[in-house]
Image: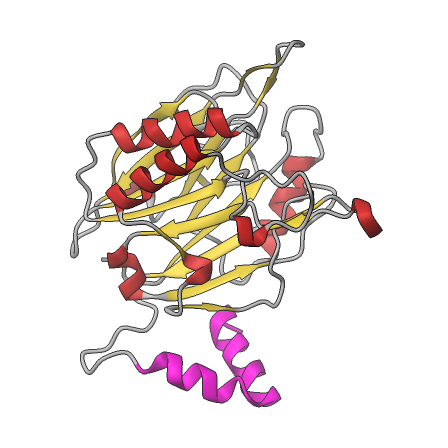
């Protein structure tokens, strides 16, 4: 489907409007990557009155196209918050066949159709903090008449599985949300890539959000995720939580790399190979060098 492995990065940027330095910091961060993403999912940009599609105007850190879901009035203050964006690099954008907003400020999608294996829909989500509101979001996504061959859902999902909770007020799901969540993931065949053996973890870090506190007040949790359909799971790949850039956000970038990563006609033996060489320090260095193209 893709000539090279497809790399997606998800990051909650905690607002691009109030801090004019953030776009420059994002540009420096993207420029520092050995393998910049073809698809960048942003959440909580806090920008309003945006055109749905434009060539990345106003986000000078990106060369390509930007697909916007404008921010919305939040709470009693009615200040503009939330908002999502999907950014495509110039080589991926020509494969776009559809895009749209699912829920204002909260969810959007794109569909890519490169020559080959069928269509891929990518859904970008910035979920509410309240379980009842999240239930409505999952139900909305589930209600769409989806028709793609492959699916990836990513973003700030703003909840934890019960086994992931590490603090008393964890944003766990109510029964209503659990029902809506199961209906959505069942319809699209989605599974958390972090839990899949076919996606090799490149980092020991296991949380994407850190409130910067220590002791009893510390909150470290994995509320940013990538979920993939079974067809993407079978292709496998790599997933990584990298250190947060505190001047940009208290969320860490989450990266997933798939498609064309390690498929062979004789079957996939890369997981066995990777596990063997990861047992040695030199093997780790060689694997990381191959991954980053160094």
User: Taking the image as drawn, is residue 213 in sight?
Assistant: no
Identify the residue shown where x is 31% and y is 38%.
184
What is the image's colouring? secondary structure
- Where is residue 131? Give x, y as percent: 51, 30
Q: Nearer the viewer, residue 47 or 141?
A: 141
**Along the horizontal axis of the image, is 203 left or right of 96?**
right
In the image, is residue 133 above or below residue 14?
A: above
Residue 213 counted in the magenta span? no
Horizontally, residue 91 falls left or right of residue 231, namely right
The reply, left or right, for residue 98 in relation to residue 84 is left
Judged from this view, the residue extending furthest toward the right is: 215
Q: Residue at x 17, y 39 (%)?
A: 147
Q: Residue 276 in magenta?
A: yes
**How many marks can you see?**
0
Q: Nearer the viewer, residue 184 or 8?
A: 184
* Figure quadrant of the N terminus: bottom left
Kindly identify the residue that appears in the image at 36 percent across and 34 percent down: 180
Q: Residue at x 57, y 53 (%)?
A: 164
**How far across and down, in percent of the image, does residue 200 sit?**
45, 70
Magenta-drawn stretch, dominant element (helix, strand or loop) = helix
In this rendering, is residue 72 above or below 226? above
**Which portion, as a residue range, is magenta?**
269-294
Q: Position of residue 174 (x, y in %)?
A: 48, 34
Residue 39 horizontal side relative to residue 112, left or right: right
Residue 153 falls in which quadrant of the image? top left
């Amino acid at each position: 489907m893709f000539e090279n492995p497809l790399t997606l990065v998800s990051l909650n940027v905690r607002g691009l409007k109030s801090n004019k330095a953030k776009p420059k910091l994002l540009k420096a961060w993207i420029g520092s990557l050995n393998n910049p993403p073809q698809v960048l999912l942003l959440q909580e940009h806090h920008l309003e009155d945006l055109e749905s599609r434009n060539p990345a105007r106003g986000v000078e850190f990106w060369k390509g196209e930007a697909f916007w879901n404008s921010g919305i009035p939040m709470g009693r203050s009615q200040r503009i918050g939330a908002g999502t964006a999907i950014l495509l690099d110039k080589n991926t954008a020509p494969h776009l066949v559809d895009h749209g907003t699912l829920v204002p400020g909260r969810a959007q999608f794109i569909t890519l159709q490169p020559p080959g294996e069928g269509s891929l829909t990518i859904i970008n989500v910035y979920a509410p903090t309240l379980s009842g509101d999240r239930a409505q979001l999952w139900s909305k996504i589930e209600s769409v008449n989806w028709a793609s061959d492959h699916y990836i859902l990513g973003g700030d999902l703003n909840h934890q599985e019960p086994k992931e909770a590490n603090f008393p007020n964890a944003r766990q799901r109510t029964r209503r949300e659990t029902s809506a969540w199961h209906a959505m993931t069942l319809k699209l065949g989605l599974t958390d890539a972090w839990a899949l053996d076919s996606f090799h973890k490149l980092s020991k870090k296991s949380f994407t959000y850190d409130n910067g506190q220590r002791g009893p007040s510390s909150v470290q949790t994995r509320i940013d995720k990538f979920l993939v359909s079974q067809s993407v799971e079978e292709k496998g790949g790599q997933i990584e939580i990298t250190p947060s850039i505190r001047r940009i956000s208290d969320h860490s970038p989450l990266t997933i790399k798939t498609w064309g990563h390690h498929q062979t006609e004789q079957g996939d033996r890369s997981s066995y190979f990777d596990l063997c060489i990861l047992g040695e320090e030199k093997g780790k260095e060689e694997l990381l060098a191959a991954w980053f193209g160094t």
